[in-house]
Amino acid sequence: MNLVPELEAAVGAENVEPLPDFADPPCYRVTPGSAAEVAEVVRRAGDAGAAIHPVGAGGRPSRVDKDPKGERSRVFISTRRLDQVLQLDEHSLLVHAQAGITGLDLERILTPRGLSIGDYPPVVLTSSLGGILAVRTPGKSSARHGFFEDAVVGVSAVLADGRTVHTRVAPRRSTGPDLARALCGSEGTIGFITSAVLRIHKKPEARLVAAYLLPSFDAAVSAVLFALREEAAPSGLRIYDAGEAARHFDGLVLPPGNTLVCAGTAGPTDLAACDRDLITSAVLAEGGTITDHALADLWWRRLHAGEPTPGPAPTLQIMATPGKLRPVYAAVNAEAARLGAIARAHVSRFDPDGAVMFFTIERDGVPADDTTCAAIERAADAAGAWLLGARAVKLDAYLRALRDTLDPNRIMNPGTLS
C-alpha cells in the first residue's frame, strides 16, 4: 500500500511532511486537526503496516527507538493543531483541553478567570498536555497538588486499530477499571491521547515565602518530612546544602554544617499562613531558625517568574523515598570525597513517595569526568536511590499483556517501554 496518498486523504496534503533525516525506512510527520483525523491516520497507517509515534506540539522527532518488529515506515503524529480548550466548567472546576495545548498556554487562558492548573514547575508546563500526561516522571509533582496525573478526570485516546475511547467523567464510585491511569505514563504505547479533562483550582488569595537555616542536611530533611506528615501543603519546598547555597545565592556563606530551606505556601490567607506556621514549627523542632526573607523571594522568582538560575546543570538527578534521602546524600558525598571530587546538592519536588535530589559533581572546579560520575551513581543506587526516569520492571508483565490485547502488531510507539 502506498502510504502517502492514504495520509493525505486523512489530513490533507499540506499536513503531510516527509522527514528526510529519517529516510530509511520512509518517515512522515502528519499534523491532524481533530481527534477524528488522528483516528483516521492511525487506522490507515496500521493497515499499511507502518508504526505510529507521537510528537509534541513543538517539533521534529529527535530520535527513533529500535523497532522490535523490524524496520518499517514510521508516521510521527504531531499535536500542534490540537491546541484548543473544548470546555471550561468554572463551577465544577474542570477544563477539557486538546492534547496539543501547552500547560503554559492553558494557564494563560485560566489566569484571567481567577483559575489555575496548580503549582507545578513551569518547566513542566512548557510541554504539551499530551506529552505531560504520556510521560510519568517525578518532576510533574507538587507538594500542594500532588502528581499532575492526579488531576486527570477523563482522557480521550485513539487505540492501535483506530478506535477512539473516552474514559468517563463521573464520580469515582460510578466507574469501573480506570483506563485513564493506564494511558497516563504509557508514552503512547497504549493509545494516542487526543484530549483530557482536568481538575483545576482557584487562584490563591495569598502567597507566602520563608527561608530557614537548619544545623545539618539531616535536620533539614527531618523538618521537611515532619511538616509534610503534619499535612502542611506547601506550594514549593527546596533544601540547599552549603555548596549549592553558595552557587545559587551569590556566594552565600552558611555557618559550618548548616543547610538552607526555602518554602512557599499559597491559598486563602489564613490557610497559607497556617501551612507556613506548620513548616516553621517543624524547623524549630529540629533546631533551625528563620533566616533572611530575601533568599526565599529570590528562590521563588527563579522557580516561577523566569529569573535565570545559576548553572551549570546538575550532573546527577535521582529519586529517593523519604527514608532513603539522608543515606543517599551521605553515600554520594562519601564516594565523591573518596574520588577526590566535590558533590553539592539541592532537594525538591517533594511528594508522598519522597523527593528528587539534584547533585552537581565537580573536581578542581570543573565538571567531573564520566568515570567519576558513574561511580557516584553506583554508590547512590547502592544506598537506595532511583535514577530519574527509571521504572519498576515488575510492571512489565502487566504492560506486555495490555499491549498484546490493544496493539498486537506493536504499531504504537514501538521500542518504547520495551
Image (tube, helix red, strand yellow):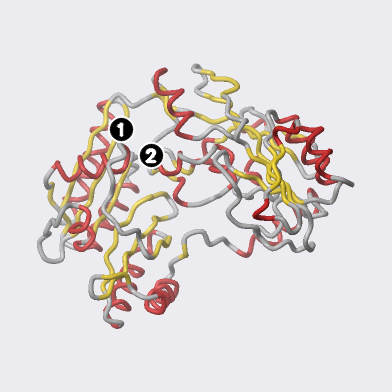
Q: Please state which of residues 227 and 40 is positioned toward the viewer in this rendering.
A: 40
Q: Please state which of residues 287 and 92 is positioned toward the viewer in this rendering.
A: 92
Residue behind mark 1:
266
Residue behind mark 2:
144
Q: Is residue 23 above or below residue 306?
A: below
Q: Residue at x 56, y 35 (%)?
A: 152
Q: Please state which of residues 296 and 324 is positioned toward the viewer in this rendering.
A: 296
Image quarter for residue 328? bottom left
Q: Position of residue 237 (x, y in %)?
A: 30, 47
Toward the right, the furthest residue is: 1
Q: Secondary structure at mark 1?
A: strand
Q: Position of residue 274 (x, y in %)?
A: 25, 34
Q: Position of residue 273 (x, y in %)?
A: 23, 33
Q: Position of residue 41 (x, y in %)?
A: 77, 38
Q: Please state which of residues 370 and 206 is positioned toward the viewer in this rendering.
A: 370
Judge from the rendering whether residue 344 lies leftward or rightward of residue 290; answer left or right.
right
Q: CA distance from mark 1 to mark 2?
A: 9 Å
Could you tell me the amino acid type at mark 2? Arg
Image quarter for residue 80? top right
Task: Estimate how packed mark 2 is, as few (under 14), some (14 to 19) or many (20 or more) residues with alpha carbons within 10 Å.
Answer: many
Q: Is residue 178 visible to the viewer in this orientation of the structure?
A: no
Of the 4 image quadrants, the one containing the C terminus is: bottom right
Instruction: Evaluate if marks 1 and 2 touch, with contact meaning CB atoms under 8 Å apart.
Output: yes
Q: Is residue 163 above or below residue 349?
A: above
Q: Residue at x 41, y 44 (%)?
A: 123
Toward the front, the furthest residue is: 20
Q: How many marks?
A: 2
